[in-house]
Image (spheres, rainbow, N blue to C red):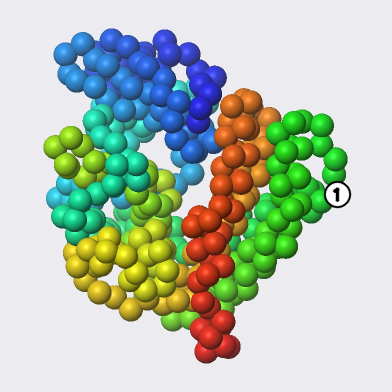
């Protein structure tokens, strides 16, 4: 989130000292991230280095913390995991918020700086290792299992009806409503196809693996030493491998040099086109619902977040963005074969 949460820095400092037993000297708010219910801080200590603190409104998916902690403990060094409190917990509750502390990684997003050939191969090998991981029952019980029901579809449909039947005075709502109406047909198609393909996959016999579920290159950090770290495990779930591979593949087969390098490290696999199409359509519906909710429904966000949400929504419809990728993913023959 870009705006600060409604908790004082003094309380954050006290809580980190109390729960993590760290000699905190200062905290600095970082206006980064695309999560409307999470905030980031840099935590400086007197003589124990720097840490990254995430402040959340809720812990909606325990697997997002338990899974990376387990993976790192199993030797997957590229996974960035939360640190334990003095009570051996992975988060600490403070007033209406939860604090999660991480080592501070001095790195940049791979999406912005790119990755070398060896890093693309490393990415492939690490993701394969994650997919092959078997979790103990005390962790797997918290990992969600894909049901192929787009969780944002009802909200997206409600917003779609509201935008086309209401008038708006708020300038950001008005701007987004005008753009939304211009793209009514595309938005309706995305919602309908996500639900339809999902219904077909509910009847399919698919192998489920442990997925990061949000493993685009903005969630890969590269340090100056060229070390790689995979962050933001909030959406971890059991799902077909295509849930993760959709972030790697531009089309439905290997198309670019980077993709080939990734699969050189990962090993070639058969891609289920129907699953790939579902996840691309489901992702579009999620983004439409998420950005739309922030602009039309959220009461506790600032003008800057609204402005960025309008821009983020519009970007979805740009050339080579996620909506184009979804609409260009073939699925009709697979639907017939699964009927």
Res 190 quadrant in image: bottom right
Q: Quadrant of residue 220?
A: top left
| Residue 79 versus residue 35 in the image, above or below | below
Q: For numbered disc 1, what is the local secondary structure?
A: loop
Percent coordinates x, y for residue 179 in the rendering: 71, 47
* Direction from residue 171 to residue 25 in the image, left or right: left
Placement of 312 over or under 186, stated as above or below: above
Q: Is residue 100 above or below residue 144?
A: above
Mark 1 — residue?
165
From the viewer's perspective, tell me whether residue 217 is left or right of residue 301.
Answer: left
User: Percent from the top left, x then y, of residue 279?
Assistant: 49, 64
Residue 46 x, y percent position in the rendering? 21, 11
**Residue 196 can be seen, yes or no:** yes
Q: Position of residue 329 (x, y in %)?
A: 50, 71
Q: Nearer the viewer, residue 26 or 34?
A: 34
Q: Nearer the viewer, residue 304 or 114?
A: 114
Which image quadrant: the C terminus?
Answer: bottom right
């Amino acid at each position: 989130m870009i705006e600060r949460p409604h908790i004082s820095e003094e309380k954050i400092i006290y809580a980190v000292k109390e729960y993590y037993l760290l000699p905190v000297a200062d905290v600095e708010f970082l206006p980064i991230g695309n999560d409307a219910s999470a905030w980031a801080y840099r935590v400086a200590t007197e003589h124990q280095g720097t840490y990254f603190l995430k402040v959340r409104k809720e812990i909606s998916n325990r697997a997002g913390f338990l899974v990376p902690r387990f993976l790192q403990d199993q030797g997957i060094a590229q996974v960035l995991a939360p640190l334990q409190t003095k009570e051996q917990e992975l988060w600490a509750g403070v007033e209406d918020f939860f604090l999660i502390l991480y080592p501070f990684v001095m790195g940049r997003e791979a999406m912005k700086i790119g990755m070398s050939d060896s890093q693309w191969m490393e990415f492939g090998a690490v993701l394969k290792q994650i997919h092959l991981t078997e979790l103990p029952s005390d962790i797997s019980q918290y990992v969600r299992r894909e049901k192929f029901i787009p969780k944002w579809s009802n909200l997206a449909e409600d917003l779609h009806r509201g935008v086309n039947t209401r008038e708006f005075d708020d300038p950001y709502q008005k701007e987004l409503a005008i753009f939304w109406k211009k793209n009514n047909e595309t938005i309706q198609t995305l919602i309908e196809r996500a639900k339809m393909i999902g219904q077909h996959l509910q009847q399919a016999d698919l192998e489920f693996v442990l997925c990061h579920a949000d493993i685009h290159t903005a969630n890969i950090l590269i340090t100056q030493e060229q070390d790689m770290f995979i962050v933001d495990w909030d959406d971890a779930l059991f799902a077909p491998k295509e849930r993760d591979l959709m972030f790697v593949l531009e089309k439905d087969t290997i198309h670019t040099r980077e993709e080939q390098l990734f699969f050189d490290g990962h090993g070639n696999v058969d891609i289920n086109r129907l699953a790939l199409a579902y996840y691309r359509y489901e992702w579009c519906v999620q983004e439409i619902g998420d950005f739309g909710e922030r602009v039309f429904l959220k009461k506790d966000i600032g003008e800057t977040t609204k402005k960025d949400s309008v821009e983020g929504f519009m970007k979805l419809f740009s050339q080579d963005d996620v909506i184009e990728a979804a609409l260009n993913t073939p699925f009709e023959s697979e639907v017939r074969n699964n009927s």
